[in-house]
Amino acid sequence: MSYNVFVTRVIPEVGIDLLRPHCASLEVAPPDRPISPAELVDAVRGRDGVLCSIGQGIDREVLSAAGRQCKVFANFGVGTDHIDLAAAAELGIVITNTPGVLTDATADLAWALLMSAARRVIEGDRLARSGKWAGWDPMELRGVDVAGRTLGLVGAGRIGTAMGQRSTGFRMPLLYVDVHDAPELDAIGGKRVDLATCLSESDFVSLHTPLTPQTRHLIGAAELQRMKPTAVLINTARGPIVDEAALIEALRQGRIAAAGLDVYEHEPAVPTELAALDNVVCLPHLGSATRATRDQMAEMVASDLLAVLGGEDPRHPVTG
Ligand code: DGY
């Protein structure tokens, strides 16, 4: 079989190597920049399959432009909030994603943010490099303790669970919010609570829900107000889960102590008001960014794309 496939971003070579022998035409987007929405619409025309990624809107226009022969949009990434799943279903286009392989990398990064925000690691790094450090000071850059403090998880799926499991070494009481019980968290003493309880009782609140109409702005001014003034908010899930303007205000006024963010409401924009604050650690959406994880994602997404084109069921289908 010889397919016509478009890859919308440069991905690790292992994925391209899998696709190449099966493709009569395999085009990969330019390496130096993300393609524009208009370029994307043009580039998908006439393809049998598209390997897309998060951060690119795959709306009805893009899916329709691909054409009736197009069988699959395989997404490099687990979140599919950027894809119009209803339109894909109507057009008979299969959507796949890459769950599981990025769980550990993302939970590790959430912990990196938690520790950095709690212990003011970035501010310390800046001071140490500045040439202005005057030596050890009993009052300098005092942060908040982690060990023994309560960790609250909003969302107890794969990544939330992995985040919670990592807390046992820190002897942290564990609360979680989810529509389902999470037996793996229950097994280590986790307690399922409602959102209000989680926010008011946790010292660290870490977000791990997908972005849906129900979770958009789940954390707004009222929710931030419920948190302890010493609490730290961590978001490695999706930016729009938090009302960013409300968060900036809460951080400015010291209504919460700090935040660690890997995601933003309007990526790639990081508001200047946010970037100007010392009590926030900002990363550029690095949750899954390890070499091994990105290789596994590339392999998984390419295999599923080929499975669909070969008439088989994909291993990781996404439905609306
Ligand atoms: C995903 O896969 O959805 C992540 O946000 C990428 O790191």
Image: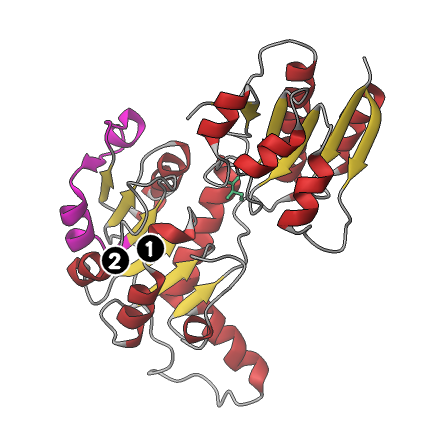
Residue at coordinates 44% horizontally, 83% vertically from top-left? 136
Closer to us: 153 or 266: 266
Real-space Cα distance between discs 1 and 2?
6 Å
Q: Quadrant of residue 52?
A: top right
Dot 1: what SS? loop
Residue at coordinates 70% horizontally, 19% vertically from top-left? 306
Image quadrant where one finds the C terminus: top left
Residue identified by numbered label 2: 220
Residue at coordinates 24% horizontally, 27% vertically from top-left? 180
Residue 242, which numbered label? 1
Q: Amino acid at mark 1?
A: Val
Q: Residues within 10 Å of mark 2 (few under 14, many from 20)?
A: some
As displayed, is residue 12 above or below residue 281?
above
Image coordinates of residue 229 in percent, x first then y, are 20, 67
Could you tell whether 67 is left or right of 178 in the image?
Answer: right
Image coordinates of residue 95 in percent, x first then y, are 55, 25
Q: Which residues are magenta?
A: 179-204
Closer to us: 144 or 104: 104
Q: Amino acid at mark 2?
A: Gly
Question: Is residue 317 among what the camera can see?
Answer: no
Dot 2: what SS? loop
As displayed, is residue 51 above or below residue 243?
above
Closer to us: 137 or 100: 100
Q: Is mark 2 within 8 Å of ligand 1?
A: no
Image quadrant where one finds the N terminus: top right
Q: Residues within 10 Å of mark 1 (few under 14, many from 20)?
A: many
